[in-house]
Amino acid sequence: MTKKSLKGLRVFQLNLPGYGGGAYYADRIIALEKALARKPRQFQIDLLGNGEMGADWALLIRSILLRRSPRTRVITNARSSLQGGSVLVWLLGDQRIIRNDARIFFRRVDMTESNDADVNWVWKESDLKYVDSYSETDPEDSDYIKMLHLINEFLPVKELSGKVVNVPVLRQFGLVENEKLDRFLAAVFRQPKESAEHSSSEPKPKRTRASAKASQTK
């Protein structure tokens, strides 16, 4: 569902199904592309639900968001706790909003493990061998590793993977607005200006007639 507010903010709801959800995400991906093609000024993605978005869906949504018009500002609003791919989608917002008691989680995976083909490797027909699916890296894990590398641009994955991360921690990394800090900085930078304006606007003390006469006699 896509809604447009009176202020021109277009809201796009993205549910997080508890299981499966392939058909749902496929439909929402098409709707997302159509909504961004209209080049809205502000585009808010509401993330809602307790499910884990697959890494491949998150990577696909990322590719779509990267192709959006430069004039479109994306706001990601986590109305629920996030896990897996939805964490990456939330991090991609130009502005991020998250419920105060919500949390994020991404499972621990060996990020050095990869089964991607080397771009410098020259393929030979003689190298073709039967691959046992149980002995090689799962493609889903490969996508998850790619996703974790992207999350690592915002958060230290090595230290935080496998742990529940709450809002205060996200604020420490500057991923959500810190209202108290913003108000403090605004007050600090406003005080010198107000002091200068106050001192310049204050009337200068007038010399009384008695003090003027005293200075003349001296």
Image (spheres, rainbow, N blue to C red):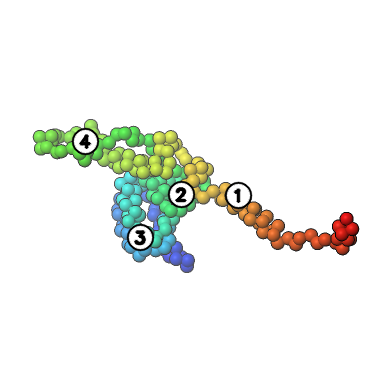
Residue named by callout 2: 80
Q: Amino acid at mark 3?
A: Ser
Residue named by callout 3: 69
Q: Nearer the viewer, residue 171 or 161?
A: 171
Q: Position of residue 113 (x, y in %)?
A: 29, 34
Q: Residue furthest left?
A: 126
Q: CA distance from mark 1 to mark 2?
A: 29 Å
Q: Residue at x 36, y 63 (%)?
A: 39
Within 10 Å of the Cα at label 1, are there few (<14), some (14-19), or many (20+) other Cα atoms?
A: few
Q: Residue at x 34, y 51 (%)?
A: 62
Q: Position of residue 48 (x, y in %)?
A: 43, 52
Reading the chain from its start, which is encountered first: label 3 or label 4? 3
Look at the image and tell me in which quarter the N terminus lies: bottom left
Relative to 44, is 130 on the left or the right? left
Where disc 1 sits, the SS reads helix
Residue named by callout 1: 184
Q: Nearer the viewer, residue 3 or 168?
A: 168
Q: Which mark is residue 133?
A: 4
